[in-house]
Amino acid sequence: MIDAYLKELSEALRFDSALSAIVLQEVRDHLEEALAQEQLNDRQEAERRVVERFGDPWALAAQFASISLTRVMRRLGIVIVIATIAVMVMMKARVFWYAFFQWTLNESARPFAGFVVTVDRFAFWFAAAIAIASLLYLASYRTPTLLQARHRRRLQRTAVLFKLATLPLGISVTSDFALTALQLRNELSAHALIPIMSLSVEIGCIGVIVYLIFDAAYRLARAEIFAIEPRPFSSH
Amino acid sequence: MEGEMLKGHLDMIVLAALSSGPAHGYAIIEEIRQRSGKAFNLPEGTVYPALHRLQQAGLLSSRWVTAESGRRRRVYTLTASGKRALADRRAVWQQFSAAIRGLLDGKRSSGQPA
């Protein structure tokens, strides 16, 4: 009965495998401790009582879903803000590097570069503003005990805001890529390593954000069942 | 006591149960049961999401230990923020409790307009 219960709990917690491993270990310890306190004349009956006292695994998973998804979204928001800061630091580092080596653009490339810099600047600040606003939106409400449909809709709105922040950040990094390519096309030397590395960091930041956005969407979709109604536990 | 009535106070109950020292989930539930005179009858599993939520809020910390039985178990401890949160909630609860008691006893608090 305990194994069947843990199997069902594991299925209910499949939206977060790391959390599932921790919770299953804790619950197993609890159930076995509770079983040790029971009269073991009839082990099956004792296990049934222990499991019944513990409660419905789907109702339990619904409570964990609320905690887990809020944590995932907060982590995503923090990563976006940190990535935005990292992109800004990398941009400034390149500008400093170019000034230090007195690298200048060709006359013919300057009008295009000027346009790209404008796009870059607007896209970057737009991304930063949305990232901060979405993090504040997420921090403005408490994590409810259950993943009610209302809380799930809030999390989905936050996910949309994060995607909205990532899009202009991606445009900003693409602009940086174009500017770096223009700058380095006649300057390919060992000194070009710093601009290339800084651009790689920016692209890596976008990659991490995109991965976390997909991960959050996957978890939200998997936890959808809890936003409707917890399923009753059946040991049969 | 009804589970629904308790759920709104679960965080405070768990924090209070941990005020006597670090404990694992089962011991916390036993502590709640003993200290409440077996009046609180929540599904035992309900305590675990509360523990995770309180840890996420920074009110609890946890570590894994190996029990005498050889099982790995997670032990929770009140953090400094958790102790402050418990003191705040205790003060609010005592104020609320005194107000309800006064209401139910039909007594009027002095200095208050009728």
Image (cartoon, helix red, strand yellow):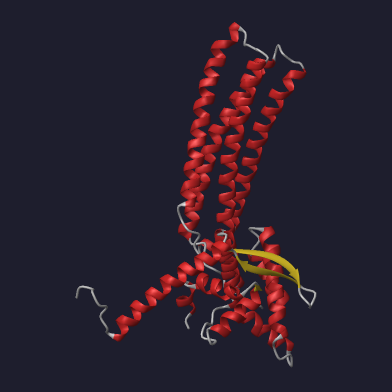
- Spot occupied by residue B75 in the image (x, y as percentages of width and height): 68, 69
Residue at the extreme right of the image, as rendered: B70
Residue at the extreme front of the image, as rendered: B111
Look at 54% across and 40% down and name the residue there: A163
Residue at the extreme bottom of the image, as rendered: A41
- Spot occupied by residue A185 in the image (x, y as percentages of width and height): 70, 14
Kindly indicate the quadrant of the structure image that contains residue A45: bottom right
Residue A141 placement, left or right of A30: left
Q: How many marks?
A: 0
The answer to which of B75 and B20 lies nearer the viewer is B20
Kindly indicate the quadrant of the structure image that contains residue A22: bottom right
Q: Is residue A33 above or below residue A91?
A: below
The answer to which of A145 and B69 lies nearer the viewer is B69
Residue B5 appears in view: yes
Look at 59% across and 49% down and name the residue there: A75
Name the quarter where the C terminus of chain B is drawn: bottom left
Q: Is residue A172 above or below residue A64?
A: above
Q: Is residue A195 above or below residue A143?
A: above
Kindly indicate the quadrant of the structure image that contains residue A171: top right
Look at 50% across and 65% down and name the residue there: B85
Residue A1 appears in view: no
- Spot occupied by residue A234 in the image (x, y as percentages of width and height): 62, 76
- Spot occupied by residue A220 in the image (x, y as percentages of width and height): 57, 54
Residue at the extreme top of the image, as rendered: A107
The answer to which of B53 and A115 lies nearer the viewer is B53
Look at 31% across and 84% down and name the residue there: B104
Q: Is residue B53 above or below residue A111?
A: below
